[in-house]
Image (spheres, grey):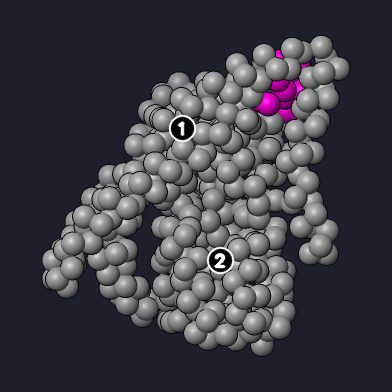
Amino acid sequence: MVNILSLISISIIPFIMSIILIHGFIKGINLYDVFVEGAKEGFKTAIKIMPYLIAIFVAIGIFKRSGAMNIMVNLFTPITKLLGIPKEVVPLVIMRPISGSGSLAVVKDIVTTYGADSFIGRVASTMMGSAETIFYTMAIYFGAIGIKNSRHTLSAALLSHIAAVIASVFICNLVFN
Amino acid sequence: MINYIWFFLIFIGIVVALFTGNIDIINTTIIEDTQQAVMFAIGLTGIMAVWLGLMNIANKSGLIKSFSKLLRPLTHILFPKIPKDHKALSLIIMNMVTNMFGAGNSATALGLKAMEEMNTLNKDKKTATNAMCMFLVINMSSVQLVPLTVLKIRADSGSSNPTEIIGTSLIATFISTIVGIISVKLLENRR
């Protein structure tokens, strides 16, 4: 099963690429010129998202490196305890929506400390595999097109994140205990 | 909202750094993390260019339109306001597919293009549409089928079965995506 999924993962990009090129070729599109014309836009987008990325990276960097992140984790521990979330994975719960590389480091730390096959290790791995970074994604997607008012995106994304956290703990309890 | 979060992160960070006596981290962050941000954007430029080039071909050949039409039954429920043969629909689905199979940067490139296409339907260019909110929430809650980096970490630390968490992750992702979709639908009717 995993092998099949990995195989698809590797071949998905070449597959989409071939379909687009073959279809374009049959339709008599001047592939090379049309490709280059579209590719030019790539630079504009990258430059457009750069200031948003820098703003987010600086804010998260300061928050993380100063130790403020750890303080926040401690503040949240009583609440998460109430939800039955093991306190060892709380840093991950907080970090996951904020930073992808940061949460990966947390998972690494949890897995080395408690063991990958421990309950804590499994919950952390499941959580990492079932959520995405929120702030940075929102910043670049909305930043790229100049949206200032994101309306209910953040609240819905956070609700979804909380659901992922609770579901991870619940499912691991069910499957591994 | 992002305004407050941004201020909060930096302000609290500086205050904590002051009290713990490592105020120098502010300088380190400004030097190192901004560089990281720029490198990321530059790294994305190449992939952006490739996908936008390919999308330009798919657009001119009519492939995007036919694909959007084909997906109509699926996308209609989630994005009722996007016309049935609109380019945004194909891009949204391709973003989801590449995301699921772990091609993160390609997914970002396609996703940014999808946002741009959705913005052509937007009357108030400063405010997100329902479709954009729905798209982003799905995007942020659904992840790759095989979380390779997590598997690598597990394998490196000597797990006897590194892949056992794929199933649990998939179920958790599924639940979180459903909750995300319902939340968007409920929240979008307010105001």
- Nearest to N terminus: mark 2 or mark 1: 1
Identify the residue position indicated by label 2 in the image.
Answer: A128
- The crowding category of the residue bearing disc 1, from other C-alpha atoms within 10 Å (few below 14, some 14 to 19, many at least 20), is many
Residue at 75%, 33% in the rendered image: A17
Residue range in magenta is B54-68
Residue B88 in the image: state x and y as whole percent.
Answer: 62, 28
Question: In the rendered structure, the residue with mark 2 lies on which chain?
Answer: A
Determine whether the residue tagged by mark 2 lies in a helix, strand or loop. Answer: helix
The answer to whether residue B55 is magenta is: yes
Identify the residue position indicated by label 1 in the image.
Answer: A46
Q: Distance between the residues labelled 2 and 1?
A: 27 Å
Question: Chief secondary structure of the magenta span?
Answer: helix
Answer above or below: position of A33 versus A21.
above
Residue at 53%, 22% in the rendered image: A41
Determine whether the residue tagged by mark 1 lies in a helix, strand or loop. Answer: helix
Q: Residue B179 carries which label?
A: none
* Residue type, label 1: Ala
Residue at 31%, 72% in the rendered image: A70
Answer above or below: position of A147 versus A151.
above
- State if disc 1 and disc 2 touch (CB < 8 Å): no
- The crowding category of the residue bearing disc 2, from other C-alpha atoms within 10 Å (few below 14, some 14 to 19, many at least 20), is many
Answer above or below: position of A173 versus B16.
below
